[in-house]
Image (cartoon, rainbow, N blue to C red):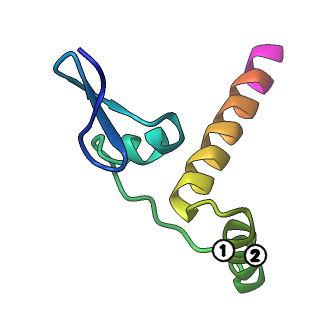
Amino acid sequence: MAQKLFSSNVFLSKGCATIKPELRQYVQMAEETREVRGRIPKDLKIAFEIACARLEVTQTAALEEAIRHWLKKKESATDEE
């Protein structure tokens, strides 16, 4: 069965919906999520907002990437001890 356009972002093929690769990061948000809160200096927050806008990345995606990077860094530091 040929792929049929289901919507502008999803293709239907053999009865299964396939998400365009460039949109998969947004599908991850459909997974169960939890809110993380914290306070950072105002200038850091503004710089973060500007960087996300300039890079066309959501703040949520950037925060998730930063947290994953931080965890990986901390885990590798623990492994070296």
In the image, residue 41 sits, relative to residue 33, either above or below, namely: below
- Crowd band around label 1 with a 10 angstrom C-alpha radius: few (<14), some (14–19), many (20+): few
Q: Main secondary structure of the magenta part?
A: helix
Evaluate whether residue 81 shows in this view. Answer: no
Q: Nearer the viewer, mark 1 or mark 2?
A: 2
Q: Position of residue 70 (x, y in %)?
A: 70, 41
Give the position of the C terminus as an image quadrant. top right
Q: Position of residue 57 (x, y in %)?
A: 62, 59
Quick check: marks 1 and 2 in contact, CB under 8 Å?
yes
Residue 80 is covered by the magenta coloring? yes
The amino acid on which the numbered mark 2 sits, given as a three-letter code, is Leu
When asked about the image quadrant of residue 4, the answer is top left
Viewed as shown, does residue 79 lie left or right of 17? Answer: right
Q: Where are the magenta residues, as a range?
A: 77-81
Q: Image point 68% across, 67% down: which residue?
A: 52
Q: Disc 1 marks which residue? A: 40
Q: Residue furthest right?
A: 80
The x and y percentages for residue 13 are: 26, 21
- Can the viewer see residue 41? yes
Q: Residue at horizontal 55%, vertical 52%?
A: 61
Tell me, yes or no, whether the highlighted magenta stretch contains residue 46.
Answer: no
Q: Residue at x 50, y 34 (%)?
A: 21
**Residue 53, horizontal then vertical, whole percent:** 67, 72
Left of 34 or right of it: where is 55? right
